[in-house]
Image (tube, helix red, strand yellow):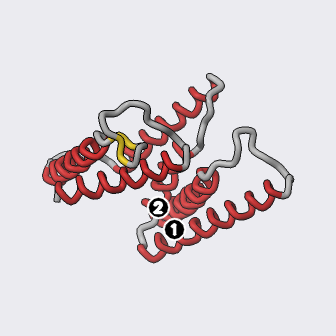
């Protein structure tokens, strides 16, 4: 399994690196050998090793006796995201709500026990994200408004995750009412 994980991560990273560097999103300036003239060859074994390490850690966690609360884990991640958001805002640095919305969306999804409702929630939130993207691009292209830092793709992702968080709050509230009745 570790060879497969390593290979998948190395191939996925190479694809992302080739795409990102070809589009000018970032560049590398120093390497012994560049793949396609843009991507340092050392990234391939680094990500292959990382994939193998991830497989090892997953197997270790699977057989370990550690028992950590899912709610506690998500709450810690949410608090860390809020902390980074506040810190960066306070220091006039660019911020993205994804650090908060993704853990909240995952928390929301975990509140929904029924697989059918999880799937429907994901599909609805995905539809809203795509619709938001299309609508915002149309409005910005018409000159109706603009973002100071430019429109970023994580905006629709934030809305998708917020929808799943709201659905999770509804389900959590429903469970609380049923358990107290």
- Does residue 63 sit above or below 124 in this rendering? above
Residue 64 rendering spot, x and y as whole percentages: 15, 48
Callout 2 crowding tier (Cα within 10 Å): few <14, some 14–19, many ≥20: many
Residue in the picture at 62% in, 22% down: 91
| Cα distance between the residues tagged 2 and 1 | 8 Å
Q: Residue furthest top?
A: 91
Residue 142 rendering spot, x and y as whole percentages: 85, 58
Who comes first in sequence, dot 2 or dot 1? 2
Q: Are marks 2 and 1 in contact (CB under 8 Å)?
A: yes
| Residue 72 visible at all | no
Residue 165 rendering spot, x and y as whole percentages: 55, 56
Residue in the picture at 44% in, 43% down: 75
The residue pinned by badge 1 equals: 122
Residue 109 - label: 2
Residue in the picture at 32% in, 48% down: 69
- Label 1: which secondary element: helix
- Does residue 24 sit above or below 109 in this rendering? above
Residue 94 rendering spot, x and y as whole percentages: 62, 33
* Placement of the N terminus among the 4 image quadrants: bottom left
Residue in the picture at 17% in, 49% down: 56
């Amino acid at each position: 399994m570790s060879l497969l994980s390593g290979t998948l991560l190395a191939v996925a990273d190479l694809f992302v690196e080739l795409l990102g560097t070809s589009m000018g999103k970032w560049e590398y300036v120093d390497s012994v050998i560049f793949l396609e003239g843009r991507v340092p060859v050392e990234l391939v074994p680094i990500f292959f090793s990382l994939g193998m390490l991830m497989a090892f850690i997953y197997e270790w966690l699977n057989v370990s006796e550690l028992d950590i609360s899912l709610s506690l884990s998500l709450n810690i991640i949410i608090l860390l995201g809020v902390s980074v958001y506040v810190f960066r805002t306070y220091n006039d640095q660019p911020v993205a709500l994804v650090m908060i919305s993704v853990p909240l969306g995952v928390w929301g999804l975990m509140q929904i026990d029924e697989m059918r409702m999880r799937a429907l929630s994901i599909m609805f939130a995905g539809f809203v994200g795509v619709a938001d993207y299309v609508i915002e691009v149309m409005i910005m292209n018409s000159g109706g408004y603009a973002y100071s830092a430019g429109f970023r793709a994580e905006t629709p992702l934030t809305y998708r995750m917020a929808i799943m968080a709201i659905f999770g709050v509804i389900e959590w509230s429903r469970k609380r009412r049923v358990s107290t009745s």
